[in-house]
Image (tube, rainbow, N blue to C red):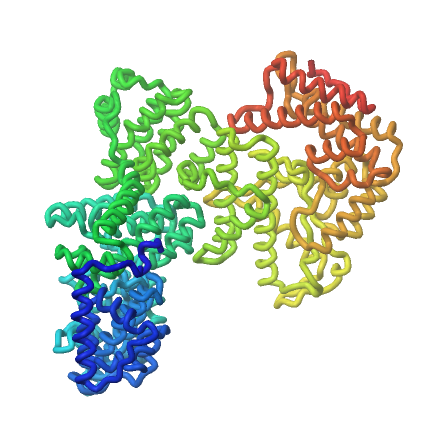
Amino acid sequence: MSQACVTAHAPLAPSLRALLAQRYADLVAHLRMSAVPYYDDAGVAERVQRLLLASDFAYGVLRAQPQLLAPAGLHWLGSGGDPGARLLAGPGLPEARDAALMQLRQARAREALRLVFRDVNALDTLADTLAATSSLHAALLELALRHAERSLRARHGVLRDTQGRAQRMTVLALGKLGGGELNFSSDVDLILAYPEEGHSDGTRALEASEYCARLTREFIGLLSEVTADGQVARVDLRLRPYGSAGRLAWSFAAMEAYYQSEGRDWERYAWIKARPVAGDLDAGRQLLAQLRPFVYRRYLDYTAFAGLRAMKTLIDAEVARKDLAANLKLGPGGIREIEFSVQLEQLIRGGREPGLREPGLLPALLAAERRGFIASARARILRQAWTLLRHVENRVQMLADAQTHVLPDEPLARLRIACGLGYVDDAALDAALAAQRAAVSAAFAPILDGAASASVPGQDALLALWRDMQVGNATAAAISACALDAESGAALQALAGSRAVRGMSESARAGLERLLPRVLHAARHSAAPQLALPRLLRLLHNIARRPAYLALLEESPAALHRLAVLCAERAFLAARVLAQPLLLDDVLDPRIEQLPLKAAAIAAEIAHLLDALDERGPEAELERINEARASLAFRLGLAFADDRADAPATARRLAALAEAVLNAVLRLAEGELVARHGRLPGNGLGFCVIGYGSLGGHELGFASDLDVAFVYDAARATLGSDGPRPLEGSQWYQRLAQRVVHWLGAVTRAGQLYAVDTRLRPDGSKSLLVQSMDAYADYQQQRAWTWEHQALVRARVVCGDAQLGAAFAQVRQRVLARPRAAAQVAAEVGAMRERWRDERDRSDAQRFDLKQGAGGLLDLEFLLQGLVLAHAARAPLITESTASAALITVLESLHVLRAAQAAALRGAHAALLQRALTCTLDDRPRLLAREQALQQHADAVLRVAAECGFVFAEGAGSQ
């Protein structure tokens, strides 16, 4: 809360001092006449005067219930606690209706007075006041419903479902009460529903629909009838299906059917704040779960923009018609624009982000900020403005207990509100409100600007061609006039004639026609229009049945521009989007600058997305893992393409991503196996996945497969699992490894996780998929070839049992640190490298193979592996690193490499890796022209290798 919103003790204007003196003296005289003891020491007078300054309503309640200013009453006024819980813990309402009406209203007045007292004396924050007001009204609703139920039971019996079980209505609050942030004097937006059809069991039985209609009328009357004591609340039922024309209460099944077939965009926004507040709360939560697919779509839903724009247009028209510019809620920069800003993110992403499904604005804003969907600076603007606007709105309503959202015109009243909030005068308050509202308007305006776009050059001709294509009348001359080459023309014709386009609704077809010229314009302004346009048109073909994605491109020119750049310059990333349109969100994602950079953060991101699943099951979890991997890899690709991350960092993060995916898949496979066969005895899983090659070396590419091996705890090989279909340990672990490989390679709607290569395990493809740690250690120590020890240099445990992982690390260290003759190592490593080059090097006189060419990445890796094998016996520290960059550093620190040699290798490694990743993003082979800089790096690798005793002879295809 801003400082200005805290009650101040600045001198009051003479007019306010006169008003307070008169009111206070009148109240003290009334207390004497009522024989109520009143002691105005210890700051009591100041607190009461602040109350009188802020609220005529409070003055009226104190005159009607003067005992509230007795010592006990004053103590109660200053006390905290939940007013709703206090009311519900009481004896309830009397049976007589008139007595119940009076008790409800007096209880509301009494508790409301306490809320004003605590607010104006800074005993509560704004959040406390709004929450307590919401709790109070929820309790009043519950008490009224109980009384109405008791009355109806006496005449018609208990309402039962078709199975004879008793059932209650549920009262769902929307709007501010649903959000737990009710204004002091607001109406309450309610929807009433009952779980099932049925009838009551009394002598004058009623069908459920009629029973609940009568119950609703009695319930509403208890709340909204105006008596000498006022009313409890104004009740608005117009948010129910069909509004005022609809039934008063609906069965759950009827509500679900309505929203599935006829629910409108504005109703989705309204249901964001839905919350059961009275009646059968569990049934209410069940109804919310049933309606969740209507409110929150499974995929990212950018059609929410159109709904917001339509609602904002209606509000703006009402503001203009009724001159409501000063309205704190509806006017420019008002509360509603803040709510729309947050609710838009909730509707777009809430289907995939359960944390956004918060009915309250501030919790929803915080969730959106934490996930990066609303930038912190923008969130701070919205939060500060909302706090001021809601505080002023609440004080405006506290003044006379009136539902209003406008500061009063009467100067003295405005001055009272301003001074009560700690401002020197109403001009200072007006200035503070104007500043905050201007900030909100500036933050909100871009949301509605996306779809408003001027026509682009050639638009009319393109649309004429498009319409001709749909009826088969397009001519080659018309295609040429639109400057379309053969491939682009064919792609546009395929789109026009597709079943997806033919089956579009009129509104969807109109949206596509608005989008097409912009697509053509974006492609023509890219670096390679001839590549970009056919790809963009194929993408439109793939998403034609997905209005949410079409809406994204229509609403966000920035996303369309970025997509055109990808299609023109980054074929690999463009292909990913074509295959998985869900990645379109990552093209625009406001979190694009907030990449998870560390392995723990990447793992946490995947864990969060799995936790967000509404439906559990191996297939659903696998699909979500796949979506998460694709999204993170795509964002890493964008960061690399935009020069926001260098090659070593990108390769390291891609390896961390694969590691996180393996962990998630291993947990998935383990859960599946445990469900069928139970667990094996012992602590931990007793199973590890070993990463080799680029995975083990923290140097994964965008399209790399995973080289892995599996080991298990030998002590559990003959033990049996404890499930209904027990397995022996060795068979249990074999099944576990098979499931991991299966899930990694399974094809889902989101694609495939990774291709897996398990041939680096002992004895390769001739052996079992998984081996005991004892057998693995024996093989490495007794039978492994030198090239297998080379592979072990880059091997590490990437997931699984920590204790078994430590055992693997010890085996690896012992094997690598075995004494070896340097000359023999150099000869064997050189021979293997020559053999690989003969088989795999694609270099020729003009082109250089970045991986296999002489002086390429493989030469650098073989050199480092050979140096580890040759020197680990005297310097075991070398074995602790698996990544090339880290190995270069440690070899330098141990003086195995001179500083100049290390610098040359470090530079060559970064440059070669940079080019290799770029080739992948360009979707071209890692064969580059032999330009000078590249050749210098390759020569440096060969020179350092020769200086260290490793002569890597060139194959026949090398220059």
What residue is drawn where x is 74% and y is 52%? Answer: 806
Quadrant position of the C terminus in the picture: top right
User: Residue 879, image x and y in percent?
Assistant: 77, 40
Confirm whether residue 308 shows in the render: no
Can you say whether 202 is above or below 530 in the image? below
Q: Position of residue 446 (x, y in %)?
A: 30, 38
As drawn, is 56 to the left or to the right of 606?
Answer: left
Q: Is residue 326 left or right of residue 438?
A: left
Query: What residue is drawn where x is 65% and y is 54%?
Result: 735
Residue pictured at 61% horizontal, 37% vertical: 652
Q: Which of 480 and 387 is in front in this view?
A: 387
Whole-percent x, y for residue 225 in the image? 14, 74
Q: Is residue 707 above or below residue 946?
A: below
Count the marks.
Answer: 0
Front residue of 381/163: it is 381
Residue 122 x, y percent position in the rendering: 34, 64
User: In which image quadrant can residue 398 be found?
Assistant: bottom left
Nearest the camera: 165 or 608? 608
Is residue 5 visible from the viewing direction of this image? yes
Seen at 10% across and 47% down, the residue is: 321
Q: In which quarter of the image is the N terminus?
A: bottom left
Residue lying furthest left: 321
Q: Quadrant of residue 22?
A: bottom left
Which one is nearer the viewer's eye here, 270 or 127?
127
Relative to residue 49, is residue 752 depicted above or below? above
